[in-house]
Structure formats: C-alpha cells, structure tokens
Image (cartoon, rainbow, N blue to C red):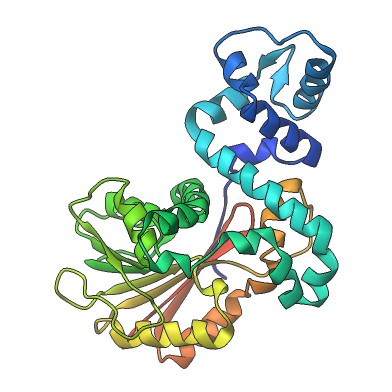
Amino acid sequence: MPESTSVHLPEDAFLEQFIGAMALESALRNGLIDALHAGHPMPHSRSAGILSALLESNGVLAEGKLTAAFTKVIDERRSILEQKLRFLRLAAKDVTNGLDDLLGDLPAFMAQSETFALFRYDKAMRTDQEALAATRSWVDYVTALSQAEAPALVPHLPLQGARRLLEVGGNTGVIARAALEMNPDLTAAILDLPAVCAIGEEMGPHSRLTFVPGDARAPDWPLVGGARPDVIMFKSVLHDWPQDQAMLMLERAIDHLAPSGRVIICERGAFASGPLPFWMTANLVFAPFYRPASDYHAALAAGGLSDVVQSDVAMDMTFHIVSGRKA
C-alpha cells in the first residue's frame, strides 16, 4: 500500500459554497476586504447588509469584522486565494453551460470552454509582450496552485541522493525551488515553453536553478549541470496530453535519464465520488483527463523501470507520486 497523507488547504474553507465564494470575490474586487482589514467598519447600506450576510455565512466575517482564520489566509495566502477565485468563476460558467458536453462530447466542451481557452500553449512559444500577457494569465494560476501544493508534496518526492533534477513542464519553478531548499546538494533545470520560462525568471535568480526554453515534445532535452539528470519529474503535466503523447514523453525521459536515475510522476488521480464543495469545480473541468495511479505504474513498468514506489497526498484531490528507477 502506498504511504498516504492528508493535507488541508486553508483557503478552501472559504470556497465551499458557490454564493459565498462569489461574494468573497466581489468583496476583494471592490476593496471591502482591504477596508475591513485596515480596521474600517462595515458600510451601512442595504447592499452592504446583503454582502455582509453572505460573507458571514462563508466564515469570512463575524459581527462585521474579518474572522481570525480568514485574516490569516489574507495575510499569508492572498494571491493563492485570488487566483483560485478567478479560475473558479470561469470553471463554474463552463460547468453551468456545458456539463452535458463535458460528460458526453468532450471536444465540444473544450471548444466552448473559457477555462481551456485560457491555456494557450501555442502563444507561449513566443516571448513578445502579447505572448507574455496571454501566457501570464494561466501561468499565474498554475503558480498559485504550486505554491499551495508544494509544502505538502515536496517532502514526499523521492529525491534522496539526487544531484541533477530536470522538471519537465515546471512552470515558474515553484516546486523545483522548494525541492532545492530541502536538498542542498541538488541542482535543477526547468524545461518549459519560452514564455513560461521568461515569466519564471522574473521570480528572481537561484544559483542552482536554470530555465531552458523548449518543447518537451521535441527530442533535444537539456542536460543539467553538464550531465544527464538523475531525476526527471513531471508534476501536473502528463494529464494535459493524450495517452500516446504522454507515453512518448515518458519514453523520452527514460532514454534521457542517467543510469540508476529515477522518473517521478506527480499527478491528481482519477475523479472519485464523495462530497463536492464548490472549489472542486476547478478540478471537475479536468476530470476526464485525470488518470488512476495504476496507469502510471503500468507505463513505468513498460519502460523497464524497477523499484516503483508510490506516495499519496490528499489535498483538493488525491495526488499520486509514482516513481521508478532506471536499470
């Protein structure tokens, strides 16, 4: 049985109800949350009274003041909260207008979906201002998710003894940076699209992290520190691709890996039944693409990898961390 851990993401407590979450987004956009945080009183008007009632039902307010729990989220995780709310608005619209297609005609759903229109990988092949602006709209969301997930996921990555990490599709490097902090002998490189790498470099230099602009579908994967990587990691990447392309990337990783190196796959598992709070809508639009852990076990075995291990971390969904070692 895989090692299993459960983690609570504190901002999700305020995203459980649709109306409450939308009221919170409105209060953030119109400056009410900032005014209350600065100690100003709740305004007195009919509309303010309605908004106050909605925010109280959501745990944001109590007796006209921000609750301690919400204040802590605003102080420590505001960008994560705001990015989740922004994406939830798009996802809720897509599910409302297209649930039938999501369940029965996936290409039709994707064609009309605002969430899928956000992820324009084709524009990320350039680094002009238009391309950077279009790319930043989804990179900021993925960065926020990684910031929320890194403290729970990175301690479970099997990086013991690793020296050279290549993260394929590593976005702005949030996961890689956290891995470097926990493993002082590790050097890392991010292989991602040119605009993504340019935005990642804006986060500031790290002496042991480099960004390599490219396309993981091309065969020329980079070295790390002048040598083949002894770890190649895919975090929330493979579900983006059809089975044949995902398996091609895994085959390329195995070929590129140093002898005795390890491939790490970190992905949300297949959508499962259970309570569905509003924040789960952000995952529902991707539900047809999430794969069970057994698919990744089979792929690693087919690639000739051994010493396959798995850790599970439950957050918004269960993340499976599956890895195998090259002979």
Residue 273, image x and y in percent? 78, 62
Which residue occupies the foreground of this view, 115 or 289? 115
Residue 122, image x and y in percent? 48, 70
Q: Is residue 54 visible?
A: yes
Residue 265, image x and y in percent? 46, 71
The total of numbered circles placed on residues is 0
Decide if residue 35 is on the left or right side of residue 235.
right
In the rendered image, the vertical position of residue 142 relative to residue 126, given as above or below: above
Residue 262, image x and y in percent? 34, 76
In the displayed orientation, state which residue is furthest to the left.
226
Which residue occupies the foreground of this view, 160 or 272? 272
Decide if residue 236 is on the left or right side of residue 280.
left
In the rendered image, the vertical position of residue 134 relative to residue 291, given as above or below: above
> Where, quadrant-wise, is the N terminus in this rendering?
bottom right
In the rendered image, the vertical position of residue 175 relative to residue 122, given as above or below: above
Question: Which residue is found at the position 41% from the left and 88% from the top?
Answer: 251
Q: Can residue 162 be seen in this view?
A: no
Q: In which quarter of the image is residue 157?
A: bottom left
